[in-house]
Image (tube, grey):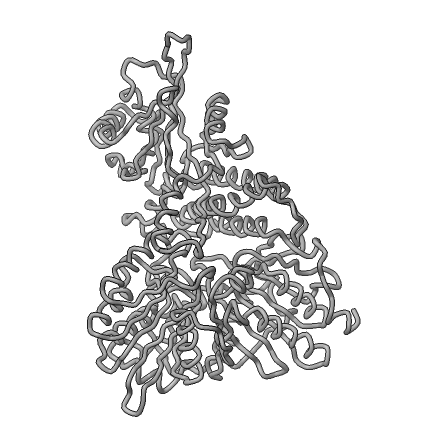
Amino acid sequence: MDKEHVRDGKFESPDFFINRELSWLEFNQRVLEEAHDPSQPLLERLRFLCIVSNNLDEFFEVRVAGIKQQIENNLDEEPYDGMTPREVFRKIRERVGVMIHDQYQLWNNELRPKLATEGLVFENIESLDPEQLSWAENYFHREVFPVLTPLAVDPSHPFPQLANKSHNIIVKLDRERSTGEVDSYAIVQIPRILTRIVSLPAKDGKIHFLYLSHIVRHFVQHLFPEERIIECRSFRIIRNSDLYIDEEESANLLKHIEEELRKRNRGNAVRLDLHEGCPTDLEQFLTGTFKISSEDVYRHSDPINFTHLMPICNHEDFAHLRDRPWNPVTPPGLTPDHNLFDIIRAKDILLHHPYENFNVVVDFVEKAAQDPQVLGIKMTLYRTSGDSPIVRALIHAATAGKQVAVLVELKARFDEENNILWARQMEEAGIHVVYGVVGLKTHCKMLMVIRRDEDRIRHYVHLGTGNYHPRTARIYTDLSYFTVRPEIGQEVANVFNILTGMGRFQGVTHLLVAPFDLNKAFLKLIHDERDHALEGRPARIIAKMNSLVEHQIIQALYEASCAGVKIDLIIRGICCLRPGLPGISENIRVISIVGRFLEHSRIYYFENSGNPKVYLGSADWMARNLFKRVEVVFPIENPELKKRIVGEILDTLLNDCVKSRELQSNGLYLRLKPKEGQQPFQAQYTFREMARKEAKHPDRESKPIEIIPLRKFPG
């Protein structure tokens, strides 16, 4: 391409874009690959199998529900990838069917037998010996029968309102009536209060498990004495769970969201899970009741929901079948007995979680709450644990008379109830709680402590790529940045003032803030690399994120690729860009790393003609992050920290040849393997070893900035 065409290339052909939903399904397939991996400990393989099911549930609750609404409303506008909602739905149906079949093949043919060999036996109730069956019957009468409620379905008893994702049993009864009807139905919902996997008495040195649903089905006759049961089958319904919130019409956002949460269990049905042996007439009865079609039905064997097996993954008696526990390392000098304020004044700090301890962040908040020199704390909270020590510290700070303001995002999907609970607790403690900006989700991760030092008042700032959630910080990879730089502190203070005071955005110099200037800033950074390459100057882009969807960003990356910019994208989940297209994206490489920890950090590197720019933040390259959320992307200007991010973190990720998959131009991923004579290299394992060595030898020097040429990459 000539230079002028490169600068104004449109790249609008649907052939240049991968469908968002199908790309997500390929991500879930990579999770399923981890369950297939024989090098994984057995219970970790089971854990990945459970995660696949949980992911699919959320996918149907939100994404498939949205597609079905588009179809019902005849919204067949052709998007950038050229696929109409009907086409996407058909592809999803086909792909999910294969994925679910693969799950059950793996469970029944490999994982379940291997677990039995190790002493974890999953029984079918039909195979129990008389002693075990007698125990199961006693368990049913003692623990289960008292809380079951059979619900008739007939002209005088309408079909009950079944909760989203609840496990139910439909019973077909032979009940002769004066009207001539001989069949009727009843529903038995298995209460969520009951454990779904029941442990039978130990036998032969092994632990035997039985699905609760098997027990209920086998003894369901006790709920219908003197009735003849024709059929008894398990089923599960998935409903539309997206919240519909018109903030401008809601006088009280918190109450409005609470009302919407109550509706979540009553949303329209989008998927019906049925046992593979369920007769056609029962299927037709259920699909008619839920107003769905046979295309929304997925049949499989037990268990009807793999997530019920998740507690088994943490069974205390089988630690040898799990990954060795990883205890995050606290860097020397950052232990609780050190004064973190003194350290931050001396230098910027970067932490790499979960390899380095998130407790440093928790300790920072707790010390700020206790420090008499601290005047105030401001913070954004998108997700946190229900028993969060951070929330407790904030409450303690407020009761101690400090000025505390917290912006709580009530619309954090599937965490709304938790957020409402501790938002109210904070309000009761006197904290100024703000619920965000109308029409936007507040997704940025910011914490600012205002402290009166001996010489002046300072802003101590923490910015991160992940949530202030101590539990997920042990399994998500994220980056934390502490600084007392006045230019950063002042701009963070300005952003807080906009969020809490609803002021106008006046512009910032160092931070990149969505929805105001983030998209424009990213496009400029990419276009600058394009121009550097066209003028023969050093140009390179490395970007790590969860998802790449935004079409303007993709088009800009294509332009940069055509100009000769080498681009490496480390994208865990969705990627709508097609790499390797001749003359378009030959200079773009996309990898995805799926391993023990969830890759969650966002890192953006631009070579900038030999003067590299490095940014971290909470934003992916998606329309929702760039235009519909409050996001903050922040620069790393400390030379040592730049070296660490680029020469250590990005370098390590790009050279993974164990957990890394490379995206092909057809939308599929190819798992990388060590070349002949090459040692296996796994990024997450390497980071753990780096953290251990850092704890033992804190005097290590940062590696120099080293960008590995494409030709050296494995695979």
Q: Quadrant of residue 425?
A: bottom left
329 shown above or below 65: below
Residue at the far right in the pictured view: 2
Q: Residue at x 37, y 54 (%)?
A: 415
Expressed as whole percent of the image width and height from the top left, the position of residue 645 reads 49, 75
Q: Nearer the viewer, residue 144 or 184?
A: 184
Q: How many marks?
A: 0
Residue 192 point in image, percent of width and height: 31, 39
Q: What's the residue at 27%, 82% (across, down)?
A: 339
Inspect this view and state whether residue 206 appears: no
Check the image and report above or below for 711 versus 610. Answer: above
Image check: 114 left or right of 332? Answer: right
Residue sitting farthest toward the bottom: 455
Which residue sits at x=50%, y=22%? 280
User: Quadrant where the N terminus lies?
Assistant: bottom right
Q: Is residue 254 or residue 701 the one in the foreground?
A: 254
**Which residue sits at x=42%, y=76%?**
492
State which quarter of the image contains the C terminus.
Answer: bottom right
Residue 141: give x, y in percent of width and height.
22, 27
Asked whether the viewer can see residue 19, the reply is yes
The answer to whether 162 is drawn above or below residue 341 in the figure is above
Q: Position of residue 238 (x, y in %)?
A: 44, 39
- 662 and 7: which is toward the camera: 7
Q: Is residue 23 toward the left or the right of residue 454 in the image? A: right
